[in-house]
Image (spheres, rainbow, N blue to C red):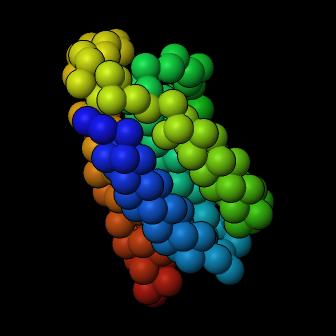
Amino acid sequence: MSQVDLEALSQTVRQILHEGHDAMRQIIAGLDADALGWRPGRDTNSIAVLVAHSLEAERFLVATAADVEVERDREAQFRIEVAGPDVLLALIDQREAEIDALLGRVTAATLVAGISRPGRTHPGAWWLLHALEHSREHVGQAALTRQLYEQRS
């Protein structure tokens, strides 16, 4: 893959992730702590959890695509509680900057190399594409959770 192709790929991934972050911002806009922490049922997640987990997973997956090890406490995202949207908005901004920097470290070599993380080995391209699909899945869940919250009787 030429440098131009790699740059185009990185820009496209960045654009798609940023669109997802904009969707997250819209989902959490105007919500209070109750709405952000509300769960539609047993074994479901709140909007705050979905946003925090999605962002951390993006960071981990993009870092893996670049073959960069990052510290991760996956379970911490599932315990998050926030007083309002400002905490999540700041988290989106922080993770977006970190992920953008990590995208700059993805190389043609890492895209094709088998990169191992606990339980899985895949080429860097797989890790990068999985970041996109995983994030959008949770953005959709967060949007639906907001709709369900707003339609409670």
Q: Quadrant of residue 152?
A: bottom left
Q: Is residue 41 above or below residue 72?
A: below
Q: Quadrant of residue 26?
A: bottom right
Task: State the count of labels.
Answer: 0
Picture residue at 37% right of the left edge, 47% below the top: 4
Picture residue at 51% right of the left edge, 31% below the top: 105
Most foreground residue, 110 or 4: 4
Q: Is residue 16 above or below residue 27?
A: above
Q: Is residue 51 above or below residue 110?
A: below
Can residue 43 be seen in the rendering of this structure?
A: no
Q: Quadrant of the N terminus?
A: top left
Q: Is 82 on the left-hand or right-hand side of 117? A: right
Percent position of residue 114, x then y: 24, 16
Most foreground residue, 1 or 153: 1
Most foreground residue, 15 or 136: 15
Percent position of residue 76, x then y: 59, 32
Picture residue at 54% right of the left edge, 70% below the top: 22
Percent position of residue 111, x then y: 30, 29
